[in-house]
Amino acid sequence: MSVTLTIAFDAAEGTMPRLLTLIERRGFSVEGIRMDAGRPARMALALAPRDPGRSAAVLDRQLRRLHGIHDIVISSERPWA
Amino acid sequence: MASAAPRTATPPLMSGAQAMVAALEAQGVRHVFGYPGGAIMPFYDALPGAAFDHILVRHEQAAALAADGYARVSGEPGVCVATSGPGATNLVTGLANAYMDSVGLVAITGQVATPLIGTDAFQEVDILGITLPITKHGFLVRDPADIPQIVAEAFEIARGPRPGPVLIDLPKDVATALVEPRPPAIQRAPSPLPDAARLAAAQALLAEARAPLLYIGGGVGIAGAERALRAFQARTGIPAVATLKGLGALPGDHPDFLGMLGMHGHRAANVAVDRADLLICVGARFDDRATGKLDGFAPNARILHIDGDAAEIGKLRAASVGLAGPIGAILDALPGAPAPELWRAQCRRWRDDWAPRYDAPGQGIYAPALLRQLSDAAGPEAIFTCDVGQHQMWVAQHCRFARPQAHLTSAGLGTMGYGIPAGIGALLAEPGSTVITVTGDGSIMMNIQELATIRRYRLPLKILLLDNAQLGMVRQWQELFFDENFSEVDLSDNPDFAEVARSFGIEAFTIDRRDEVPAAIERLLRTRGPILCQARIDPRANVWPLVPPNSPNIRMLER
């Protein structure tokens, strides 16, 4: 089941690819992205787990460890739909 | 009378490289491990007169691994430096090693000048991009005035609460530009205790348990929570097992300590995990080498998971109660409950009944016995650094450690070539300690050039080379799981390692009989300078017990 993560972050050099690298490596495919380059920047990502063992809640905590992450909201909404 | 014009004090301008050196000094750095080259030359130009020592290694990978060993022993981030391109990529294994084992590291790499970035310039590589998945964070310095802030942030991120490597990529033009550095401003976020309701839920689990077991990981040492863990264990009497990185959190000879669990764990430890009804996971992460087949791990147990990193709780095994925060403070806040005496006595019986035996037949050197004798002779405070393979598991099984910092091993990444650089780092972090590197004839070749570093700085590293003329662990797996189809594991054409060591100016000798072991240990420990002992062992020796891949830990193969 896909989820949407909305991440507020400091858009420093390298932060966005770091976010995407972590998300894919931790077992989620990115099905959609919407970005608002404010301060902080906001990125909404539609994600689907690659196997049933992957949890959005665990991914949320793994992303929060990254430097410059302000907030993460998990929802089932698709803001670009 | 002429009036003097008012004068304002202007801070002197300095180059970006000088600002980098000053920022490292401000962090209290005492040693930096590195290797110069084109794009990092401004940094090396600023180095003379620095308040820290630069250790010139002979390969950048060794710089990162030595910084790793330094950090594990000192408790402060290690620092390594390399130039752009191949210098930077040679750091990658060391950064991954530090990332997997949660070791604080700050890596400084030279980069081509800013206008050349992205033009495929000579020795240009996107090291920030390459290291994204194996660093906690990375900085590409664009403005030299930011250097103090970036360095301060890098150290803060590297320190924790869960430490890890941070990269600072320094373009050459930024390093040479003159600047008035801006002072750093760092805000440290406190790490709060879990709320009272969670602590109460954890206490209820402890009170209900009939067969509780502590499952100790490397997070205890990282958090400096050994005192709290030992106090918790003492007031509850709960038996304990440890991961490879958790060894030393409880003393190896503690009567309630059952040893390492997992693939090459002690039978007592794996059986206790299987029978436990409450597993108190403290700073461990349910790594596959520890759990074996996850579905069959601790099948009867509820999980109380305590960790400094909230992301580890529930990652692989759901916790009945998860407590994220400062491990020591959490343990201090849990009164616990006495372990039932029947369970505790049963665990002690398992420990005694299945204790390792050291009476192997024959006159050849039996590696487990040699290591046990060496550990006993060196004392529990001695620091062991390992390479990767059979000898690494034998060290974990048969040496005893009084503290986590006494056992430096590449646990997560399994980096062959770790042992000697880590030994260099350990000796510089704790110059008064006995530091012993245990290596194999496969591993030593991965960073053998660092014998030159040992010689240059006259570091009294004691190297025990267990030489079976094989890639022993691979050979063991081919024997057991690949129908004895031995493929590319023969290293019998290795050089004479004692001669090699002597050619680097290091004292060395070789033994191949059991009756030579006591004198060899005495010589290793007595010699003041660096020394290498090559011990030839049986090429067919295997590490036991062994849990076959994808099996529950209870299905151990024995000799």
Image: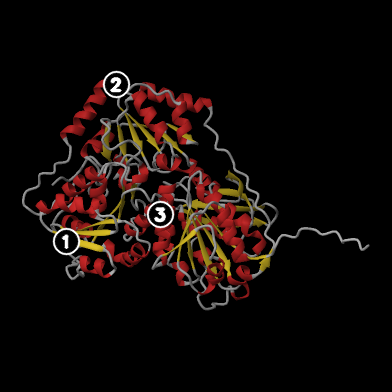
- Frontmost of labels 2 and 1 is 1
**Residue lying at 17% horizontally and 53% vertically, measured from the top left:** B520
Gap in Å between the C-alphas at discs 2 and 1?
Answer: 51 Å
Q: Which residue is mark 1?
A: B510
Q: Nearer the viewer, residue B231 or B482?
A: B231
Q: Secondary structure at mark 1?
A: strand
Apparent side of residue B135 relative to residue B208 in the rendered image (left or right)? right
First of labels 2, 1 by sequence position: 2
Q: What percent of the width, then of the height, locates residue B527?
A: 25, 55
- Label count reads 3
Task: Name the subunit of mark 2.
Answer: B
What residue did someone put label 2 on?
Answer: B340
The residue identified by callout 3 is: B428
Q: Secondary structure at mark 3?
A: helix
Q: Image height check: is B337 above or below B286?
A: above
- Residue B294 image offset from top left, x and y in percent: 32, 43
**Labels 3 and 1 positioned on one and the same chain:** yes
Q: Quadrant of residue B59?
A: bottom left
Q: What amino acid is found at the position of numbered circle 1 in the picture?
A: Thr
- B475 or B229, which is in the foreground? B229
User: What secondary structure is marked by label 2?
Assistant: loop
- Of residue B181 and residue B280, the one placed in the foreground of this image is B181
Contact, CB < 8 Å: mark 3 with mark 1?
A: no
Residue drawn at x 87%, y 61% as measured from the top left: B5
Of labels 3 and 2, the one closer to you? 3
Q: Position of residue B173 (x, y in %)?
A: 62, 72
**Looking at numbered disc 3 in the image, what kind of residue is underneath it?**
Leu
State which tag comes first along the sequence, 3 or 1: 3
Disc 3 to disc 1, how far (Cα)? 27 Å
Chain letter for mark 3, please: B
